[in-house]
Amino acid sequence: MKILVAIKRVVDYNVRIQIKPDGSGVMLEGVKMSINPFDEIALEEAIRLKEKGLAESITVVTVAGKQAEEQLRQALAMGADHALRVDTDQDLQPINIARVLEAIVKREAPDLILMGKQAIDDDCSQTPQMLAGLLDWPQATFVSKLELADGWVRVSREVDAGLEELSVRLPAIISADLRLNEPRYVKLPDIMKARRKPIDILTLDDLSVAMAPQLEIVKTEPPPPRKPGRKLASIEELITELKQMGVLS
Amino acid sequence: MAERDILNFDVAIVGAGPAGLAAACRLGQLTRESGREMSICVLEKGAEVGAHSLSGALLDPVALTGLFPDWEKRDPPPMTPVTQEEVHFFANQSRRLKIPPWLVPRPLHNQGCYIISLGRLCQWLALQAESFGVEIFPGFAAAEVHYDAEGNVAGVITGDVGLDRDGNPKDNFQPGVLIEAKYTLFAEGCRGHLGKELVERFQLGWNNASNDESGDEARQQDRFQCDPPHYGLGFKELWRIDPAKFHPGKVLHTWGWPLDAHTEGGGFLYHWLDNLVSLGFVVGLGYENPYLNPYQEFQRWKTHPQIRGLLQGAERLGYGARALNKGGWQSIPKTVFPGGLLIGCEAGFLDNARLKGIHTAMQTGVLAAEAVAEAFAANGRNDEVTGFERRWRSSWVADALYRTRNFGPALNRWGAYVGGMYSWLEQNILAGKVPWTIHNKTPDHARLKPAAQFEPIEYSGADGKVSFDILSSVYLSNTNHREDQPCHLKLKDPAIPVEKCLPLYDEPAQRYCPANVYEIVQEPEGPRFQINFQNCVHCKACDIKDPFQNIIWTPPEGGDGPRYVNM
């Protein structure tokens, strides 16, 4: 079985986002970038399936500029077999990424696609669903547990009411939630080996896909600052204050 | 438990700062010139190169130009030449005195220097080093020195990862990797935890253990003669200011208020680029009053009208802190020992009088690389690279440090006014050519006086505009440590903070730590010493200033700590 894992290069989750002064977007200069954490979880799951002997190969793909090579190397060091970069410097919008991935799927013919439930930069949570629609494949989103057997994937989904158990037939698209697993630490010798592995580069032309922007970002601005809190001396004072604010009667 | 992997390199470098990376670049160049293969790796505990680098920073490009004469054509990191400089004396919270240029001590002149971000310089140096085939591994801390059977340094061991709070391996546990190397360059920066161990083990310089245990005089005399290292704690913030007030290339240094004449330190403010201003404050860690709070002094400094005016309506983007060496010439230990070398701030090569250390860090890295390449060409391994001692002692680094060697000790001995005047006389009139050397033989931690001799200092609260509380500052350092791991700040004796340090010194760790790591929490059963290691910005102040030398800084899991951006 062949697994395709799609990853996105995003600002590291530990870095506080700063907005450009002109509101045209987020500052990326000198900022630490990483694999989107949910995509890393998806990749970890793929590697575990391979380690259990349930998959033969893992291809990791990203749609990004040259700098994303660092994240692809990280993925190779974790345990992916092949890395693919679709070269673009355009704005990454879900429907366009889904179309690019559709073309990659036709090329690579995977049996299972794993990806994060959403990217932590734009929080869209749309690409896996759109890709499933384009391919007309079954999908299971927000997955926190996954088992493979006889051409089916049995999953637990994290939904508002609790957990939903679902079986989907392969080929399928699975989007990973936080609790699916805890990704491994990359080993130093594996980083060295990953640096010597080839990364295939494709252009949008190679895939005959055009990225037509469907969304326009009008303005990016930080959330309004939170009002400072106050320390009160006693419960009585708190109750008086709350009454004054009309919260208590 | 999983087996420990072993990797072999000809040269291992600990720390991807200016010293380590300059050494890596120079080794790469020499390898290319000689055609003889040499495998080189650099370990960096930060999540990426530059993540733990923090400096003002003013760069004297002398070492950079020596290393890459064409650096300006190599897509250099963002920098602005110094165009205008001022030194101000803050007399009190509102008055200031501009010092005429002729009265400014000569080493404080910055013509030909550049305002830079050290983190960005390091990222650039890393790219250059990688172009020579150097392997750089960010996210991997060198936790231990590896010694061979004869006791020579033979590499380092990276930290284990995936341990829980109690030190038990979790499912994703990975043992550290043994990096075996013929030569190991230690470039951890100021107060590196491995460097500290090496100085003690090989008796390279001032040694707390040997100095505290009187009676063993023979051992004390045996060791390399030098003063103890001296330190400052440097704070930095990055601000984006009103374009109307921004003057690219302008440099301001201040001394005086809010510090008293007995406490060393001062402020800096550099107009970098894109309306970004780097500003900060350094407090000498030899201060005496345990109630002094360096963080609050820094916040107070920003409320001076001269600084506050500039920051009106501005946005604070970054915060960080790091200890720096200011012992200079007298405090530099022997830098070589079997199998290893100390370079850059690890050995204390910062030029305190010039308030600069990037150029000396880089140059000692370059000189160490040349000495190591020579030893390697002679088929040496794990021996003492004496060529480095010879090289740096006959270099401009030694000249510069020797010429200004009395600057720090004079300030220390006579305070900011008399000491400052002395330095002006010595540097501007006598051109640094005096036959005497002033010493400061008291380690910084031993200068702290009992709290009973002082009144607690009242610091006014943060205004949320130019001065801030400490936690909102730490937030801007992007610091993170995985919570479920052993605490990386070790206590030799867990009873000392509450039983000794609290009654005698009111536990100064509560105040000198720039990240609110240490707290005394009042519980019904009495006070408790709490260590919030997740906040640690890896500044090393606790390891330096704890009066009982009871707090030991060790590296946490690789990749943890601050993620400084443009610092």
Image (cartoon, coloured by chain):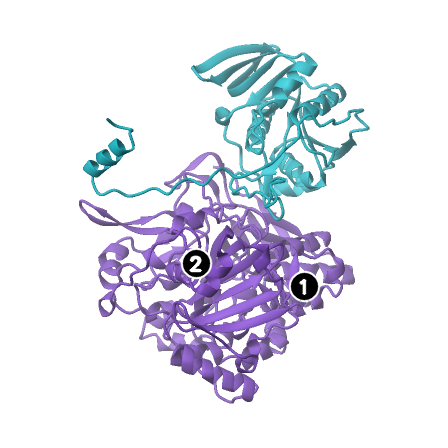
Chain colours: A cyan, B purple
N-terminal of the pair, mark 1 or mark 2, is 1
What is the three-letter code of the residue carrying label 2? Answer: Lys
Nearer-the-camera pick, B5 or B435: B435
Q: Chain of mark 1?
A: B
Tell me what residue is drawn at x 66 percent, y 56 percent.
Answer: B78
User: The residue tagged with tag 2: helix, strand or loop?
Assistant: loop
Q: In the image, is residue B350 above or below residue A41?
A: below
Nearer-the-camera pick, B370 or A27: A27
Find disc 2 in the rendering and name its residue: B540
Q: Using the rendered image of the protein, determine whether residue B188 is visible from the camera's viewpoint.
A: no
Q: Using the rendered image of the protein, determine whether residue B468 is visible from the camera's viewpoint.
A: yes
User: The residue tagged with tag 1: helix, strand or loop?
Assistant: helix
**Alpha carbon of mark 1 to alpha carbon of mark 2: how far?**
33 Å
Find disc 1 in the rendering and name its residue: B376
What is the three-letter code of the residue carrying label 1? Answer: Phe
Q: Chain of mark 2?
A: B
Quarter of image, res B513: bottom left
Tell me what residue is drawn at x 58 percent, y 61 percent.
Answer: B271
Q: In the image, is residue A88 above or below residue A21?
A: above
